[in-house]
Every structure is written in C-alpha cells, then in structure tokens.
Amino acid sequence: MIQFDSPALVPADPEANATDLLVDRVAASPEAVLFSLPDGDSWSPVTTREFYDQVIALAKGFVAAGIEPGDKVGLMCKTRYEWTLIDFAMWFAGGVLVPVYETSSPSQVKWNLGDSGAVAVIVETPDHFARFDEVHPELPDIRSVWQIDLGDLDKLVAGGSDVADEEIERRRKIANGDDIATLIYTSGSTGKPKGCVLTHSNFVELSRNAAVALKEVVLDPNGASTVLFITTAHVFARFIAVLCVHAGVRVGHQPDTKQLLPALGSFKPTFLLAVPRVFEKVYNVSEQKAESGGKGKIFRAAADAAVAYSKASEAGSVPLGLRLKFAVLDRLVLSKLRAAMGGNVRYAVSGSAPLGSRLGHFYHALGITILEGYGLTETTAPATVNLAEKSKIGTVGPALPGVSVRLADDGEIQVKGVNVFKEYWKNPTATADTFDGDWFKTGDIGVLDDDGFLTITGRKKEIIVTAGGKNVAPAALEDPIRANPLIGQVVVVGDQKPFISALVTLDPEMLPVWLNNHGEDAGMSIEEASANPAVLAEVQRSIDQANESVSRAESIRKFVILPTEFTEESGHLTPKLSIKRNVIVSDFADEIESLYLTTAPVTEGHSIAG
C-alpha cells in the first residue's frame, strides 16, 4: 500500500473554533481592507474591523431572535458578501449553518432542512422563499424565516441592539475543535444527499496549515485578492472564503459568470478560484472571438506556442527560436487575454474535475499558475493541491500539511488528517462504510508518483466493465472531449456492452458562434444541429483525438448527439456541474440501447455517429 504523509506546519489547537480566525485577523490588521463590495463600476472597501463589527451586530440579532447554541439554520443564497457575514455571525451566536444550493428544488430544500432539524432558514430572494414556502408545511421545526432582499438582516441587527457583548463572547467560546461547525449535504450525484458533519477543527487547522503551504498565493506582500464567483454553498468556495478571512485576503463577489470578465477587469485580483469548465470557457470564448475576427489561425498558433513554451520551461530549457516566437505571439495575442482577467492574476486554484495538461500549460505560459487540487465535501475541500514551489501540471499535487494520502490495493484513494469530516449526520451505517479506521475511503481511484503527487484516474463506482471484461475509466475519455467549445457534456457508456459508446450534448452558448465561424446557419436549434453533418464531423474529430490516448478496447466506437442539454434544472447535473451518471443512463436508456442495435465492425479510429 502506497502512502504519503505531510506533517502539519502549525501546531494543533483543539480548543480553537472558527471564530478565533476572525478574532486573530482583527488583532493582526484591523484597518486592512478585507472585502470589497460592488458599487457600480467600482468597489467599496470593508475593513477587517468593520466586518467584525457587522458580524457581532448580526450575531446579536440571531441571539435576540431565539437562536440557541447548536441550533441548525438553513441558508439559501447566491455567492455574495452577506454569505460570509452570516456564516461568521452564526458561529459567534453559537449556531450551525446548513447551506442549501440557491438552485435547489423544493424537495431538496425540504430534505436539507428536515433531515438536519433546522429551526430557522435564511433565503435571499422571493423565488427562494417561494420554493421554501412550498414545503414549509412539511417542516414543523422551522419557526423563523428571514429574506435578505427584504432587508431582514438589518431588522435582525436592530432587534439585537440590547444583547450584551459579553453574551456573544460567551457563546462564541462554547464550541471547541471537535464540535460541529456546519452541516453540508453532498450534491447527490448518487442517491439521497448525506449530511457531512464538518468540525471547527476541520476549518481552523486546515486554514492555518493551507495559509502556510499556499503563502505565495494568499500572503502576497503587495496584497492578495480574489473574486469569488462559484457558489459558496459548496465546500470548495466556502473553505476559501474562510481561508481568506484567516489570511487577510481582500475578497469581492460576482455570482453572475456573464459579468465575470468586467468584474475581474475592475477588481484586478491576484488569484482566482474556479472549476475547470470556467478555464475552458475563457479559452474557448477567446478562440471563437478570434475566429470571428478572422484571427483564429494566429490565436491557435499563439496557443500552440504557449503550450510548447510551458512544457519546455518545465523541462528546464526553452530553445531560442521558441522563446522568440512565443514573445511575439504573447505580445500580439495572449497579453490581451491577461489584461481581460484584470492583469494581476498570478495563480488560480482549480478543483472538482481534471483540468487537462494542455490548458494547464496554456495558462502557465500566460504567467498564471493553475494549482489543481483534489478533495470532497468530506475532506473540507482540499486534501491535495499543487503548490507554487512544488507543482506538476496534470496532477492534483501532494497532500496538504496535516494530511495523509494512501492508495488501497485496488487503487482507491484514502485520506486522513485535519481535514477529514467527523461523520455523516444521523447515518452511522454510511459512516462506518466509508471509514477504514481513521482513513476516509473517497471512492475515487488514482496513482501516486515517487514524489507523492496524486493523479486522479476515475471514480471507483463509475468504472465501466465491457462484455469483454475490459475496465474503462470514463473520465480519461470524457475530459478531453468536453474541452471542445462545441461540446457541452459527454457521458461514456458501455457497461456489460460489446464496446464503448458516448452520449454527447452541445454547448448552447458556443453553438451559434461555432456555426457562424464554420459557414453554417447560426440560427439553427440544438435539435437541428445534432443532425448537422458539420457538427457531427466536429464531434467525431474530438472523439478520434480522445481515442488516440487509449487502447482499442477502451475507445469510443459509436456516439449520439442528444437534441437537448444536461442542466441542474433537468436533474442531470449537480450544483457544481458534475454529471449525475446514474440519472443520465436511466433517462436515456433507449438512446443507449439504440447504439447497440447493430454491432457491425468499426474501422480503427473512426466512430459512427448516431
């Protein structure tokens, strides 16, 4: 059994809780700007002291409203300043937040609030309230409902003015490291979501150690800053938000990804947090924009030069000719992309899915080091991450300080350490099933190199076994195909079938741009495009490229383009945009079966479009 241990860099403090992170930050830099709030085309500063005062005032409001230590309170809100304000205020009041994705259906809202035993809920918008209100009669424990857009936070603050500072200080000190800090429900790609009990120590020890390990990112001497745009209800952004308070990183928020580039341009962050789909989108939009302007060829030349430059740089020597070529193309093309992202981004932390080495090298050549990491809700987000001074493109890095990683005999990744959750809420059977002693069994499979760098190769439960007995990891085929701007999602199928096939959807945003750039009718519908010969040929080309990296038995032999798209609303994607494989396979069973009605021999390297 292969195992790597990364010793903690900060001594553990079992008595500390998440409120100490803010108290320590106020002591260290009370007048430093901790948040910037959107204000038209600019940003208004909020100092650490101002944030702390607002946290205390809101905590008093929760106390006056009847929130007791240990009470569970639901929060359904998009990524914005108030999310982190409520998070810390609830900790200071002694309560426990239960995040609900802002896109959740009424039945999902009912499950999270009902299973957790929540006594109150905070929603952001009338739409959120309507979804909650639909199931409110089935949630008898909910006694208080507050809506942010109605000004209820201000009303809470006003109602708490008589609560003494001493009461908040008493309450904030009740929890120790082993106590529950939050109850986060898994996104439910399989079965009913399970509540993950994350402790105060999970946040405190991981934040303190990660800040040291990622000091180049979060402790920039000129002032580190970031714009959060992925949902804070997910553990990935939630942990980064807490880490930023601990490390004194200036944070802005922009939940609308269509407004992301303008926000980056005005905020000028030094690092970003994103999922690979965002990096793919930035690249694809830039490429198609260049194509529309008749400069597609030079953009692709610049991209190829960037990848070659990064690979040569990583190997230790860049030939003079390549250095000169890259310098010219960088000035002509790539510098504009850097400027569009604000001009100051030096690092990006990427998680939730593999990025792919080509994009990693592309952004690296732009001067943006993408630090891929790996983790789950159960590991408080990161278990491993590439570091500024210790990075390998294509891997998800070594274990963070205070964390150990090992591989079981079947390749399953197992984790123990300061980040591993305590248990599944009210589910001792699931808790017992997922632990081997202190080791959390992730259900993912991977490989560790001699330096302890982890590479994810797939999900244990998603391994496809063909009728011929060949084990196939879908991600190895899906990730490179999905990088094509035309393609929205791809789902590899073939369990107990004679060969591997794929279901493909088109990207509705990129489709008209791609059609226009390739001389096709940009106004055609997804249904029309799914049968268009040029579209079929482009999908075929991406599949052929992916097939080159696997054996004949693992290659995709047939595919069908579905005349629809997978969305969270359709029930086919999780809130972090991961595919719900079991749901898709069930919903599109007829389409899958149609791929296997004829099993004529297929020419090597060519798929047959359905």
Image (spheres, rainbow, N blue to C red):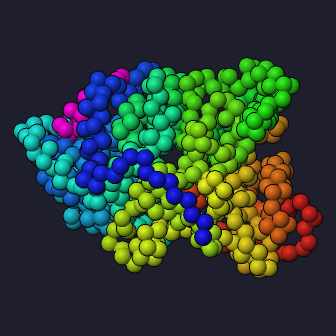
- Determine if the magenta segment contains residue 46: yes
Rendered residue at 69%/53% (across/down): 479
> Total label count?
0
Residue 501 in sight here: yes
Q: Where is residue 126 drawn, in percent x and y?
A: 33, 45
User: Where 46 falls versus 174 (above or below)?
Assistant: above
Q: Main secondary structure of the magenta part?
A: helix
Quadrant (top left/top right/bottom left/bottom right) for the N terminus: bottom right
Which quadrant of the figure has residue 296? top right
User: Where 158 falls versus 339 (above or below)?
Assistant: below
Specify whether 66 is left or right of 103: left
Q: Where is residue 297 drawn, in percent x and y?
A: 83, 30
User: Where 78 falls versus 411 (above or below)?
Assistant: above
Quadrant (top left/top right/bottom left/bottom right) for the C terminus: bottom right
- Determine if the magenta segment contains residue 137: no
Q: Where is residue 92 drawn, in percent x and y?
A: 21, 46
Rendered residue at 81%/48% (across/down): 538
User: Where 310 falls versus 410 (above or below)?
Assistant: above
The magenta stretch is 44-58
Specify whether 394 is left or right of 349: right
Which quadrant of the figure has residue 337? top right
Q: Nearer the viewer, residue 494 or 365?
A: 365
Rendered residue at 84%/29% (across/down): 319
